[in-house]
Amino acid sequence: MTSKHLVVRETVGLYAAKTSLSALVERAARGEEIVIAKSGKPKARLVPLDDVRPLRRPGRGRGAWRVREDFDAPLPDEVRETFEGGGS
């Protein structure tokens, strides 16, 4: 968990969680941590997501760029020497 989260642990019963899930999700999105209990025993935690970027879809950029035929050709000597520590 990152430091940006406001951690306020509250235990909520399963029935109450079912009837107010939307509100609990909003609270979690704001940084609260909610523990969901069944028969008084903690069963799950509702916490904010750290990374909400969409999942990558393979092939989505197909045709947007092209690899040149010489992409794996040897580097020019001056560039190679720079990588190998021989350049100035």
Image: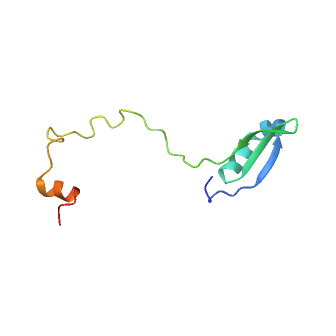
Image check: 30 left or right of 66?
A: right
Residue occupying image coordinates x 71% and y 55%: 7
Q: How many marks?
A: 0
x then y, percent, for residue 75: 15, 49
x then y, percent, for residue 43: 77, 37
Q: Which residue in the rendered view is the most extreme toward the right?
A: 39
x then y, percent, for residue 5: 65, 56
Residue occupying image coordinates x 87% and y 39%: 40
Task: Quadrant for residue 37, please give it.
Answer: top right
Q: Which residue in the rendered view is the most extreme toward the bottom?
A: 88
Residue occupying image coordinates x 30% and y 34%: 62
Question: Relative to 28, does residue 38 appear above or below in the rendering?
Answer: above
**Which of the pair 48/78 is nearer the observer?**
78
Image check: 4 left or right of 34?
A: left
x then y, percent, for residue 55: 48, 38
Image check: 69 left or right of 31?
A: left
Residue occupying image coordinates x 80% and y 37%: 19
Question: Relative to 64, does residue 83 appear above or below in the rendering?
Answer: below
The color scheme shown is: rainbow
Quadrant including the C terminus: bottom left
Image check: 57 left or right of 3?
A: left
Q: Which residue in the rendered view is the most extreme toward the top?
A: 59
